[in-house]
Image (cartoon, rainbow, N blue to C red):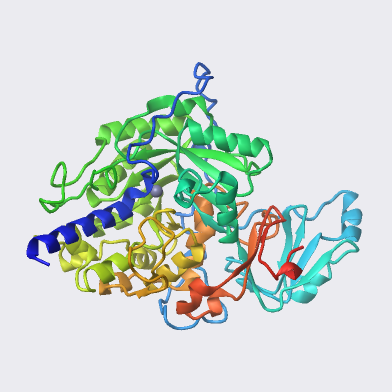
Amino acid sequence: MNLKSISLLLLSTAAVLLVACGGSDEPVSSPTPYPAPTPTTTAAQPTPTPTKEQDKPEPRNPLTPSPTSGAKPTPTVSSNSRSSPVPTFAHAPIPSPESTIVPTSDSQSLLREAGPEVIFHNGVVVTIVNDRPLEQALAIQEGTILAVGGNEEILALRGKNTNVIDLNGRALLPGFIDPHTHLLNERMFWNMTLEEAQDLALRSGITTIGNPFANQEILSELQGLENRGALRVRTNLYLSYNDNCGQVFGHWYQGQPPIIEQDRMLRIPGVKIFSDGGTCELRPAMSFDLPKDYVLAGRKGDAFLTQEELVTILVEVNDAGYQPAIHAIGDRAIELVQNAIEEAFAGMPVRVRMEHNLYIRPDLRQRYSELNIIPVMFGQIGTCWIDKVQGGVSTMGELVHPEEGLTTEGRTWVNPIRTLLREFPTLPIAWKSDSPYLSVRPLDHLYSLVTQRELAGDDYVWALPGLAKGTVCQPPWWLENETITVEQALPLMTINAAYALGMEEWIGSLEAGKFADLIILSESPLETDPDSLPNLNVLVTMVNGHVEYCAQEHGALCP
Ligand SMILES: [Zn+2]
């Protein structure tokens, strides 16, 4: 291989990695940009009544440390050691919902007699609640969690109609929440129908998703599904202001008012805005020059919007009652968006999401906390490309900038989840799969978050071709430095992801009063060797207390 072909390989790898970094939002089945959403037939309807959830005084601002959170120790990261028996979940201090499970009326005695519909006992119940992180049993009544506790305490609730299920030491966890996946609208990658794509999510242990690209077409499809009672995964749509190529669709979204009711299977919490490239042959907006052969436009990548334009859009979106979710990959885009958020919402408790956040310059880290920004970050980031294509020597930083190169320090900008958690233990970082670009399976991402290794796959867009399925790819030092523990990772994949969607009072942990959205795993991930995390089996997935997936030969676990 001559120098030129090596350099081409390197650049094409860079392209893939950069795409991986943000590309998320390009359709798989078609090389053309997304079709512009067409206005709804009710385009003439007035601007939706602003519900302005985000404008209300927010009693639960997780960025205001609670009295106890200040005492929280810096999380100890020891990804290769087994977990301590009593985990501490280093997530944002999100309070438990007010429990309303004990009826005060005459119905109480009737309910008591019938008892909860289901009791799971004799298991490892991983609650994601710091007061009681591990329990043994859980009771379900009318689709919600009635109680969580020790075996005796929960079995005492048994009534004549209760189905009592022995977990036999298996683990019960909240269902995984993937706040940024293209599972539904890019299901053609797997050649699936909407129903089959939902099945894929459910058997992977996912009970709630956020869909970060919604035009009229997917909106109508999903509304149809919800109307038929066939939406089985809680689905949150972010309506598209513009697309990954920078094409602006504008205000069409205002024809579809936000839906933020917690008990709707189809919610519309927000609007998605692209601020920089990553796909569509456009590049993330960087503060430094990208390699000459790589860029297609400016050497510093492509920012789609000015700060002033961003401020206008953010204010409009928020005023109409939607949560802004802004794609920003490069450090220049992140800074631009942070500045716009500061200008638009200074002093207001607006819960803004930022998607990808792949190159976070050190001076930008503290601003997530200061500005109430939820960083939604990659679980996997393509370790196989970094490890195998460049022989374990080159880094993503070098690929981005092979001539001048990201400095050694610069490589530490890449997806710095551990660094952020160390510096800002209450920052509600949420993971995302960005499937089908990366694995749809949360357990693959948990493995990558904890080890930064990747198991080569063949069922996602950015799988490295030609590698035997299951090959273990090793991270370079700068990725290995960002490993976190299972205790740290689980909240990112549950309660913090719920927070990103505005649903933390109802899902994301196993607490009385929350929806019974849960999974049974073959073993507790807290007790699993990190290298075995991808091999854990999802045995049961429940949404709203209904079994939506039951693994073959595990019928005894499925009420
Ligand atoms: Zn995406």
Query: Farthest residue toward the top?
Result: 44
Residue toward you, 155 or 402: 402
**Residue 282 at what x, y percent from top left?**
24, 43
Residue 125 appears left or right of 288: right
Residue 109 appears left or right of 206: right
Task: Work out whether 130 lies above or below 261.
Answer: below
Q: Is residue 438 visible?
A: yes
> Disc count in the image?
0
**Residue 146 at what x, y percent from top left?**
75, 59
Residue drawn at x 78%, y 72% as measured from the top left: 153
**Residue 558 at what x, y percent from top left?**
74, 64
Q: Quadrant of the N terminus?
A: bottom left
Q: Is residue 92 visible?
A: no
Residue drawn at x 84%, y 51% as measured from the top left: 104
**Residue 257 at what x, y percent from top left?**
54, 29
Q: Quadrant of the C terminus?
A: bottom right
Residue drawn at x 57%, y 81% as measured from the top left: 85
Residue 335 appears left or right of 402: right
- The quarter of the picture where residue 123 lies is bottom right
Task: Work out whether 210 lies above or below 462.
Answer: above
